[in-house]
Amino acid sequence: MPYKTNQDIRSTGNPWVPSIDAFKGGSLSGDIQCDYLIIGAGFTGLSIAYNLLKQFGQEKKVVLIDSHTLGSGASGRNSGMLGPGIGAPFHRLEKKFGPEKARTMFQHTLDAVDSSIALIKREAFDCDLTVGSQFKVSTNSSNDQQLRLESDALHRNGFELNTYDEHSVQAIVNGPRYRYALEYSNTATINPVKLLRAMADKITALGGEIILNSACTELEEGHAWVGKKRINFERAVISTNGFSHSLGIQKGRVIPVSTSLMMSSPLSEQQRQQLALKTENAVIDNRKIFNYFRLTADNRLIFGGGAPFYSTSGIIAEQRRGSDGPGSVYQELSAGVNKYLPGLTGLHIEKVWTGTIGVTLDNFPVISSYRKSIDSVIGWCGHGLALSLAYGAAYAQQQKESSSQAGLYWHRKKAPYLSPIPLLPIASNSYIRYLNIMDNLRGG
């Protein structure tokens, strides 16, 4: 057993933040005018701002605002794993949408990973980029069958992926319960906060303005208010993901949910041999309530997943104070390590933390025109790292061509409705419990 009590944890809160000095941003001293206003300073907002500035240069004034600090939502609190996938396993996409649409969807996510890596390399963003492979693994006979169906469907549709049986999986990672694996090559891992900072610095160097700790309190055609200060814009983009309900966007449809992670001290050489995972690789299992893990550049284990939970206002406040990471999160994640990586001994956990993502009932994002002059890009459902980094280029191109957003399933007016706002905590947590029960019935 690598864990004993909660006292083993040195601290809670986001472990990425100490790796850089905090980005300060500008300030809003009065009313301003801009061509593009972007609300939300996570990867979606930064990507849109960066690409608009690259597309139009000094011709357009681009302003980005956020109610808190840079990347204070999911962007600055995730695992830093850049990988493909959206909505559902590929064989289910094929069944629901047909082969052609399923291929288009999945290829879009592969392209998003490629373009994200290319962006980081092109701009020489210092973010500990490590290119390797992401392995999707099964943990029991039931989800082993599902992963093989997914593998067959991917190969049938022309996606060439390596597969590994139960014996060969152990050469990738020492996980005795892992029975089968799919390899997504040319994926990557990063330090997300370093990338946020690098992108923010680039945006300001290009002439963009980033204003933090400035909540949008009212939004209408052509105007936004930050308290009593007015921002006039030609076009606005809402990129607030799991916090969009505060603006009245997709209420009861894009749900704020917390995911959990923990980070260890640097592994010893013996522990690295026990784990048998290369630094450039990452692992994610294919259960409904799943775990995932990777190594950092300095050989720390990041292990995440487990049952998510509804992000109440109190939970979000704790995340922003850096006091999140309750004992129940620690216990669930440590149980996951004990179960799936039993050979890894003597592990010391330094940080446990959570982060709020935006989730929809069908696991697809929502990209739409909220109003005539306002677009929204939200609900990434935990797949936002690569997709949001890639989206900005498409948006900037649409603005140059004055074209509409269309073509992909998630370019839609609204996500499926779950419940009224007052019932969302109960409805969300009940649905998560149902998924957990289904996993347990299938062998965990």
Image (cartoon, rainbow, N blue to C red):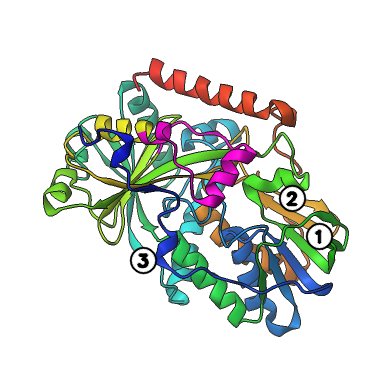
Q: Quadrant of the C terminus?
A: top left
As helix, strand or loop, the secondary structure at mark 2 comes to strand
Magenta range is 305-330
**Figure check: 315 above or below 193:** above
| Apparent side of residue 364 relative to residue 339 in the rendered image (left or right) | right
The mark closer to the camera, 2 or 1, is: 1
Image spot of residue 45 (x, y percent): 63, 62
Q: Quadrant of the N terminus?
A: top left
The mark closer to the camera, 3 or 2, is: 3
* Separation (CA) of disc 1 from disc 3: 38 Å
As helix, strand or loop, the secondary structure at mark 1 comes to loop
Image spot of residue 130 (x, y percent): 33, 63
Q: Nearer the viewer, residue 266 or 88?
A: 266
User: Residue 368 — which label?
Assistant: 2
* Separation (CA) of disc 2 from disc 1: 26 Å
| Apparent side of residue 397 relative to residue 188 in the rendered image (left or right) | right
Identify residue for label 1.
227
> Callout 2: few (<14), some (14-19), or many (20+) C-alpha neighbours within 10 Å?
many
N-term-proximal mark, 3 vs 2: 3
The mark closer to the camera, 1 or 3, is: 1
Identify residue for label 3.
128
Q: Is residue 359 visible?
A: no
**Figure check: 163 above or below 320:** above
Image spot of residue 165 (x, y percent): 23, 35
Q: Nearer the viewer, residue 357 or 81?
A: 357
Q: Is residue 301 visible?
A: yes
Q: How many marks?
A: 3
Q: Quadrant of residue 28?
A: bottom right
N-term-proximal mark, 1 vs 3: 3
N-term-proximal mark, 2 vs 1: 1
| Residue depicted at 59% across the width and 46% down the height | 317
Amino acid on which disc 2 is placed: Ser
